Image (spheres, helix red, strand yellow):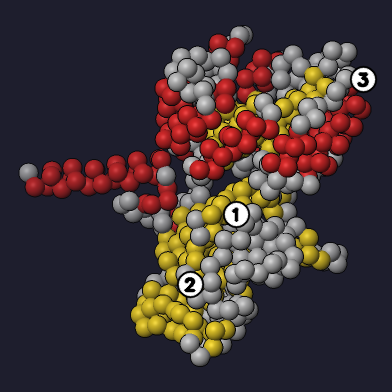
Amino acid sequence: MARYRWTIVVVIVLLMCVGAIGKDCSECHKLQLTGKDFSAWRADTAQWQIAGGARLNPADEKALAVEAGTDAILNGPTGRTANLFSRQEFGDVRAHVEFMVSKDSNSGVYLMGRYEVQVFDSWQKPPEYPGIECGGIYQRWDENGNKGFEGHSPRVNASKTPGQWQTFDIVFRAPRFDKNGRKITNARLEKVVHNGVLVHRDVELTGPTRASAYDDEKSTGPLMLQGDHGPVAYRNLWVSPAGPNPFFAMDTATKDDKHQTASEQAQMLKELGYPGVGIGYAGTDSLAQMLKELDQRDLQLFAVYTGINIDPGAQPYDPSLKDALRILDGRNTILWVFAQSQAQKPSALQGDARAVEILRELAEEAAAHKVRISLYPHQGFWLETAEDAVRIADTVDLRNVGVTFNLCHWLKVSKDRNVKAVIERAMPHLSVVNINGADTDGQDWKTLIQTLDRGTFDMRGFLEMLRDAGYTGPIGFQGYGIGGDVHENLKRTMTAWEKHSEVLRGDVTPFGEPKKP
């Protein structure tokens, strides 16, 4: 009888762990890198030392004094020693870092040994250049003599005074490569939070930052701590799987009689576990209000839906968009841009030149505010198909202009149903994917737009295909016209997402055996 009781206990523990993995890998796969020894790091630890903690040296504010114990690591008595590399190599990762610097000191956390989030004494200091600040994404140099480009300043200076413990919370996506080793997706810092303050969202990294350990890019790499730029201490440094792509809701799925205001919608999304929303543009006042509500709940405005008109003599786009871009400055939000015409039929090539002209103008304005554009195919509009969006993005040829794949619109207009070919063609530009439950042979919007737990379309297979194509960006839920209780629709959809998205969770083996959360 006792044997059976033990069997039941083991089964329950395993089920708890599997359930945790299915919803969030972070707890059951958390890998601690700092502690009583250097077992998690490569053997050559140089002058790095184990300590109980650190504080400013009372005799020299540019030095750190060591405290007895085993909770922290420091880069030696002078702050000038070798870089420290984790034994294990990682791809996508969620990282928590606690650090302390002395006055004017400098270090860095390098994801995959290649992409630096800067550690620096930035207390009340104006930045010398983008990326030098604490929490900055350090600038790149390259072999062609290009120096100091693609540095990204944090949205705000969240630094504490030297000698205080500070924190980073980072979500990172590794670059992707095809079977021939050609890079098909750049690395991305999906989120960086410094001392509880969001400082970066969805920043693309086209290559290793300056002072990286490697000049190349690969699918995995070690975590590296810079050790030769001044005194620094680290503690409670852990990593875990990054989890699946961010899954947000479009506001087509968030509004009903009970959820009309930005506050009501944002609160519902927070409670149901959505990281944010994509909205239709209705002017600067409503945009600012939505941002206020999202910011209060640490939610993201993923995209803003707006359009252009390519007809001669027509107003090309809402003139208030320039003010909207200033409101969105530095948020890396996407403008979802559809394109309409009364003069041209859907997909007519005669409209290309005017569309490209308008989009280049809008994209240059958007780039000045770190806002991206994603072309939004819509059944019945001039820009109707994913192929149209790719063709125009190719011609515009600006880095901040990408394309969106909309499942419901693709099903409505597609003739051959070869979704893999469409995604692979779109991949160089693909910045957003919109999904929903759907019937593969559906003919109207009621069958083509359903909650994610309904419909005959093979959603799991589609997400596997997205994964294999190398897509790491956000995925939105389209809820237009579903009707009923939006809270119930979103709840059902999130439950289905947690099941379907298991295929996007990646390899968790670098983080060790799963542990009970």
Q: Is residue 263 above or below residue 343?
A: below
Q: Amino acid at mark 3?
A: Pro
Give the residue number, with chain letter if any, for mark 3: 312
Residue 476 lies, in percent from the top left, at 58, 31
Mark 1 and mark 2 lie on one chain; the one further toward the N terminus is 2
Q: Nearer the viewer, residue 1 or 222?
A: 222
Counting the numbered discs, the total is 3
What residue is shown at x 50% (from left), y 56% (from top)? Answer: 196
Picture disc at residue 54: none
What residue is shown at x 59% (from left), y 69% (from top)? Answer: 123
Q: Secondary structure at mark 2?
A: loop
Mark 1 and mark 3 lie on one chain; the one further toward the N terminus is 1
Disc 2: CA contacts within 10 A as few (<14), some (14-19) or many (>=20): some
Give the residue number, with chain letter if any, for mark 2: 164
What residue is shown at x 50% (from left), y 70% (from top)? Answer: 99
Quadrant of the rendered structure where residue 140 is?
bottom right
Picture disc at residue 199: 1
Residue 202 lies, in percent from the top left, at 63, 47
- Between the residue at mark 1 and the residue at mark 2, the CA separation in whole angstroms equals 19 Å
